Image (cartoon, grey):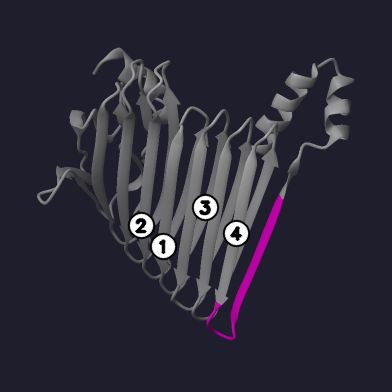
Amino acid sequence: MNKVTEALLKKVSDWKGDFKGAYNIRENGQCAGRRSSENIRIENKTDGPGLVIHISSAAQGETVYIPACVTRGNVSDLVYNDFYVGEGADVTIVAGCGVHTDNEGEAEHDGIHRFFLEKGAHVLYREKHVGTGSGTGLKKINPVTDMELKENAVMEMDTIQLGGVDDTKRVTKAVLGEGARLVIHERILTDGEERANTDFEVSMDGEDSAVDLISRSVAKDNSYQEYHSRIKGNCRCTGHSECDAILIGNGKVNAAPELFAGDLDASLIHEAAIGKIAGEQIIKLRTLGLTEQEAEQKIVEGFLK
């Protein structure tokens, strides 16, 4: 691995020189390191670029790392990763992505991840995206997450993008079976001329399934964000969508949450709020000795926690 990859790994996947357990490191479209474990097997796909990750029912409290890095311009990396999670398994999956360019060329990573959770499986999916480098070429990350949750399976998704990515299209889709539960926490910060588009679609097809979707975002300078969510309740189920955004400078946000109730017992709620930082918050922090800029930063950090 090169030095840029190591720096990106520290940012997106808490790299400390090695990973404990199973891992695959992708660097500029190639494998830079891999290790399977007794209960987690990582193999190459046979029908295209990417991986097949088999997680057995015996995996309990284990972590698998699948980070990807693009470390120079003029690289466009596309990968397909499929995760098969056995009945009753309990795992954490870390799939951060970093793009970097110090030249004129564009750096892009497009990751398509599909998850198939068997009955009673539990997955915590952590995803952090960053862009670094002084090059003028655009830094792009376009993640696609497609999930299928069977009976009583639970998927928790924690996805973060806090600046540096010029353009991103983030697509997340899920189908929930009986008693399945999906929890998504998204945090996005854009500044400069950056653009971010988020699209969620969740279909609850099994009785007593549930989804809780929370998105918090900050749009600074001349950046622009679009947020679309569609929650479909096709049976007795519960769904909640919350979208909160802060505008700073000339930042703009377009939020469009959507609910569809296809059953009398579908209970669906959505909340959306967009606004600037309240003046009294700034004043209160300035009385503690902070500058206006420092106060604003503290508020943003707290909001995006």
Q: Which residues are magenta?
A: 261-273
State the residue position of label 4: 256
Q: Position of residue 215 (x, y in %)?
A: 59, 49
State the residue position of label 1: 174
The answer to whether the residue labelled 1 contacts the one labelled 3, judged by CB atoms less than 8 Å apart, is no
Q: Secondary structure at mark 4?
A: strand
Quarter holding residue 42? top left
Q: Nearer the viewer, mark 4 or mark 1?
A: 4
Q: Nearer the viewer, mark 2 or mark 3?
A: 2
For marks 4 and 3, the one nearer the N-term is 3
Residue 146 is tagged as 2
Q: In the rendered view, would you say 171 is above or below 234?
A: above
Dominant SS in magenta: strand
Name the residue at 55% across, 49% down: 226
Q: Position of residue 54 (x, y in %)?
A: 22, 51
Q: Cα distance, mark 2 to mark 3?
A: 13 Å
Residue type for callout 1: Ala
Q: Nearer the viewer, mark 2 or mark 4?
A: 4
Residue 303 is tagged as none
For this view, does 122 lie left or right of residue 253? left
On-image quarter of the C terminus = top right
* Magenta region includes residue 268: yes
For marks 1 and 3, the one nearer the N-term is 1
For marks 2 and 4, the one nearer the N-term is 2
The answer to whether the residue labelled 2 contacts the one labelled 1, judged by CB atoms less than 8 Å apart, is yes
Residue type for callout 3: Ile
For this view, does 261 lie left or right of residue 51? right
Name the residue at 53% across, 60% down: 229
State the residue position of label 3: 184
Q: Secondary structure at mark 2?
A: strand
Q: Nearer the viewer, residue 168 or 305?
A: 168
